[in-house]
Image (cartoon, rainbow, N blue to C red):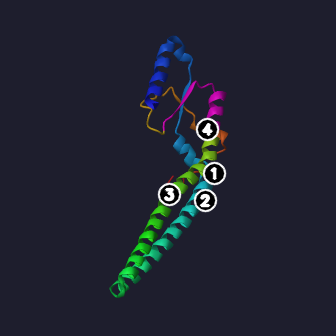
Amino acid sequence: MKKSLLAVCIAMICGIGANAQNLKFGHVDSQKLLEQMPQRDSATQVYSKELKDMEGILQDMQAEFNKKYQVYQERQDSLGAMAKKAKEEELQQLQERIQSYQQNAQQDLQKREAELLKPIMDKAKKAIEEVSKENGFMYVFDISGGLLLYYSDKSVDIMPLVKKKLNIVDKPTSTPAGKK
């Protein structure tokens, strides 16, 4: 679908003909922009803490399973058929709970990551739209996705304008001591 949309855009551009010289095109690497937004760090910290909490719970569940399995292994020869079957069912249920928790945790973490990133992505999108309107760009392409196969030097990189709109300051690069 994205390729067909790109093809339609290119066809429209080619069809415009003489007016094409008046069109302004821009591009931005949205991935790099998102990585440089300060809100991304706090979202990453929240996500990392929640991930660590869920991993801790999973490790506790796994430790409980391992302990019960070890006890079962040590005593299985002395257990009667019914007790042995009950312990095996208990272990099976515990293993299923672990797998279910793992799957649910993974889904919950994906949803949480989307929740944490949405306001950041919305803010970036709004800034891109504002910069595009303020500077008269007809189209702005996102070059981070790899779909755009070519853009000329006439296409303007709007990253500096968007970063300015978002008050993102480039961090100074340090040079090794003694080198200039």
- Give percent across and percent down for residue 178: 50, 58
Reply above or below: 127 against 95: above
Mark number, residue 39: 1
- Dot 4 or dot 3: first in sequence order is 3
Mark 4 vs mark 3: give the one in front.
3
Q: Earlier in the sequence, mark 2 or mark 4?
A: 2
User: Which image quadrant for residue 1?
Assistant: top left
Label 2 to label 1, Cα distance in Å? 11 Å
Q: CA distance from mark 3 to mark 1?
A: 23 Å
The CA distance from mark 2 to mark 4 is 22 Å
User: Which residue, given by chain and number where applicable, does mark 2 sit on?
Assistant: 46
Q: Which mark is residue 125?
A: 4
Mark 2 or mark 1: which comes first in sequence? Answer: 1
The relative height of residue 97 versus residue 65 in the rendered view (above or below) is above
Residue 132 forms part of the magenta stretch: yes
List the residue tagged with mark 3. 106
**SS state under label 4:** helix
Question: 79 or 174, which lies in front?
Answer: 79
Q: Amino acid at mark 3?
A: Gln
Judge whether residue 177 can be spotted in this image. Answer: no
Residue 42 in view here: yes
Looking at the image, tell me whether mark 3 or mark 1 is earlier in sequence order. Answer: 1
Q: Earlier in the sequence, mark 4 or mark 1?
A: 1
Question: Three-letter amino acid code at disc 4?
Answer: Lys
Q: What segment carries the magenta color?
A: 125-143
Task: Name the residue type under label 1.
Answer: Gln
At label 1, counting other C-alpha atoms closer than 10 Å, the crowd grade (few under 14, some 14-19, many 20 or more) is some
Q: Nearer the viewer, mark 3 or mark 1?
A: 3
Outermost residue to the front: 82
For disc 4, the neighbor class at 10 Å (few under 14, some 14 to 19, many from 20) is some
Residue shown at 43% from the left, 79% from the top? 68
The kind of secondary structure element at disc 3 is helix
